[in-house]
Amino acid sequence: MDKPVTPVAFSPEDLARRRRRSVVMAWCLVGMMVLFFVSTLVRLGASILDRSM
Amino acid sequence: MTSTLSDITTPLAPPLGGQGEVADYWALMKPKVMSLVVFSGVVGAVAAPGAIHPWVAFIITFCIAVAAGACGALNMAYDADIDAIMKRTSKRPVPRGALTKEEAYGFGGFLAVASVLVLGLFTNVVAAAFLAFTIFFYVVVYTMWLKRSTQQNIVIGGAAGAFPPAVAWAAATGGLDAGAVALFLIIFMWTPPHFWALALFREGDYGNAGVPMMPNVSGRSETKKQILIYNALLMPTVLLPLVTGIGGWVYGIGAVALTSKFLWHAIVLYRTTERSVEEDKASKKLFGVSIYWLFALLGLILIEQLFNLPVFPAWF
């Protein structure tokens, strides 16, 4: 049988590290968004204006 | 009393995870190795025939960089046990306890999948498949199989490090031809002297970790002989761009000069006495020269392409 898991509280240092990781992850997601957006524009080129309104 | 993650993480108990700094994840991607891989990828993309949109060139480079980072992370996850033994690698995030193996596997796996998908989405399927194969070759064939089983590990495994310019070439053109093969062969032939020079002055490290490298299996003299042979073979190999349409006079003269210098340092190392101070110095020197040699050689191709300098026509 598995041992009962002891509850673990995060120390202020743990929380600060987690926050720093989260901020970088958020920036990476923004970067990916820009990457996909610009790449789509580049691939479509002038055809981006060729659409039914 | 309530314990914290920091309290319960001791050298005896494996860390629970979630404690890594951003810098630890960065280190997991082996940024120094990544820079050389990225540079070779840029050269492959630029040297490929036909015009390429700068943004597409950026996407290709970005995906190769991320894939290289994935390889680094997966390698560090799998090799955590031997990394902990070797002085050179003991401070890496996993053996140091900053990240768990599971975190490294998760991070590396995500990067691997993301790099292949993005490359496939914005360039072509051939390049994406080639990139996926490169990651597989480095992680499974080299790291998991060859590295611990044969002294020829870095000779065969070196192919993984030589694939990136060919991947970039495939991404730019949709296929491969002689120019891509020439770039592959240059890096492939460069790998053994580069790593065996390192292994000579880190022989104890590899021996303690049980990693079969040329110096601790066949001896130092044999290693120096093999380094010299590969260096000599590099000379005709660096001439291949001249007959595959990606090299001109600037490259030709520069490549012969650089490779002569590289070969000279291999000869100096070959002539040193076993386990002497001179041998140690010469192996370190050769290792350093090998890094600059590859940067400079690929840089010559890049300069010719960027400045539209004339190149010799391809023979085939």
Image: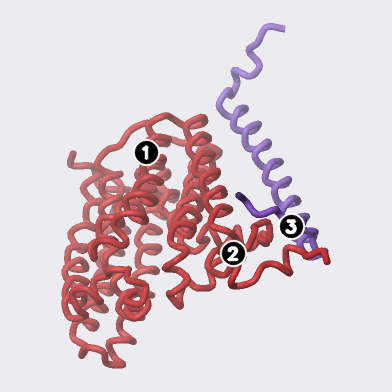
Chain colours: A purple, B red
Query: Viewer-proximal residue, B114 or A30?
Result: B114
**Residue B205 horizontal/vertical position (percent):** 37, 77
Residue pointed to by mark 1 = B130
Q: Dot 1, crowdedness within 10 Å: few (<14), some or many (≥20)?
A: many
- How far apart are labels 3 and 1 at the CA level? 47 Å
Mark 2 or mark 1, which has the lower sequence index? 2
Q: Element at badge 2?
A: loop
Q: Amino acid at mark 1?
A: Phe
Both marks 3 and 1 on one chain: no
Is B196 positioned to the left or the right of B58 in the image? left
- Taking the image as drawn, is residue B56 in sight? yes
Q: Amino acid at mark 2?
A: Pro
Q: Which quarter of the figure has residue A6?
A: bottom right
Q: Is residue A25 above or below residue B291?
A: above
**Residue B129 horizontal/vertical position (percent):** 39, 35
Q: Nearer the viewer, mark 3 or mark 1?
A: 3
Q: Dot 2, crowdedness within 10 Å: few (<14), some or many (≥20)?
A: few
Q: Amino acid at mark 3?
A: Thr
**Residue B255 horizontal/vertical position (percent):** 28, 63
Residue pointed to by mark 2 = B14
Q: Nearer the viewer, mark 3 or mark 2?
A: 3
Residue at the image position 26 percent from the left and 59 percent from the top: B252
In the rendered image, the quadrant that contains the C terminus of chain B is top left
Residue pointed to by mark 3 = A6
Q: Is residue A43 above or below residue B101?
A: above
Query: Viewer-proximal residue, A23 or B216?
Result: B216
Query: Viewer-proximal residue, B107 or B300?
Result: B107
